Amino acid sequence: MATLVGGIATSHTPTIGFAVDTKKQQDPVWAPIFKDYEPVRQWLKDKAPDVLFYIYNDHVTSFFFDHYSHFALGVDDSYPVADEGGGPRDLPALQGHPGLSRHIAHCLTMEEFDLSYFQKKGLDHGAFSPLSLLWPHEGGWPGAIVPLQVGVLVFPGPTARRCFKLGQALRRAIESYEEDIRVAIVGTGGLSHQVHGERCGFNNTPWDMEFLDLLEKDPEQLTKLTIAQYAERGGVEGAEVIMWLIMRGALAPKVKKLHQSYYLPSMTPICAVIYEDDPASLPAPAAAGEYRKRVSRELAGIEKLEGSYPFTLDRSLKAYRLNEFLHRLIEPGFRKRFLDDPEPLYTEAGLTGEEQDLVRRRDWRAMMHYGVIFFMLEKLAAVIGTTNLHVYAAMRGQSLEEFQKTRNAQVLYSVAGKDEGKINWDKK
Ligand code: FE
């Protein structure tokens, strides 16, 4: 079974990553950052977690306002560094842990948290700035991560209470994971700062100290504060510190604080804290088997449905490249190139030989088996000027006529819009 080895809280100001990249270890202004994080590096080295469950927020780098959600769980097998304007930092990509991601997704969904899932997105300074100092990474990172992106930049966002409860559910999720892995939980962001408007430059060290004290000894108190109260006390951007409550919620009611440092060189305090459970304060663990049964209840038996391929997170990961290729057919320019000469596009998109072959042969059934979702098939059908009914018949291994006989009326349709010649079959 997985073990939760403890929690880290850290600021994620870009200052930390900048200090690392420009090697400011000997500079007296920057040196305290390196000194303050040394105990955290050592703790991680001693605890040797296989996975960091890493709570951060993206700064409108990889998550834009076209689709902004409260809790986005990374379900990928790899996370590169995002480009925030001047080229990505020179850090290796992080390995994901799709198995743990999937398990957590099932658990949190059962506990009524409405997640979104992400893949193929770079992580910005919210994740990599402190991580590049916490975890040595020459020649690769020492473990994998499961990131959780929290949508704290658009209001209304999650509340402090919601974050704390999510953390409590997260502990149950991690502790019921069957693999023998060690997991540490990292909450990032904060402390008091504001980076926009005439109030930019606002800090409040007395409030930061009070927050740190309550986080350790009485986190429930912090769940009673509104976002407006967090903004008043710690700055509007500083309200992101509610992400620390997710980390704290996952730990025992009583914790031991092993380290705390606080340094305010410029706009944002650089703060790092280590907590471990006080095991005496933990309630008797719920039977993991019972919990896992509850978690799997929603989809139990679905795999027995014949001729059915529910689009699960593992299908989504496995067939991402091919689904993405077909999804791009909604772009007029891509669509035109696909119809004119698809071969260079296959290479550009990095489709494997098998994937290219499936598209070339329009093998609807095999694409479905491979992991393509039906709604990509109907797009491809529209683009090449055929109908949904042709696809349905092919998936069932029937001729169009045979399949049509199973319907009350023999009609044809597709999702094609106004493109020239796309519904010629309707005129026949
Ligand atoms: Fe932030």
Image (spheres, grey):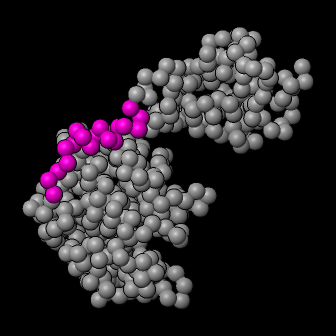
Is 400 above or below relative to 384?
above
Figure disc tally = 0
The span picked out in magenta is 283-300
Quarter of the image with the C terminus is: top right
Give the main secondary structure of the magenta stretch. helix
Q: Is residue 180 above or below residue 23?
A: above
Image coordinates for residue 254, horizontal then vertical, percent? 16, 68
Q: Compared with residue 260, is residue 105 higher up or lower down, i.e. above or below?
A: above
Q: Is residue 303 visible?
A: yes
Residue 1 x %, y %: 19, 41
Q: Does residue 179 appear anywhere in the picture?
A: no
- Between 101 and 89, the one nearer to me in the picture: 101
**Is residue 237 shown in magenta?**
no
Q: As rendered, which of 329 and 108 lies closer to the eye?
A: 108
Whether residue 291 appears in magenta in the rendering, the answer is yes
Measuring from the top left, give residue 322's x and y in whole percent: 56, 32
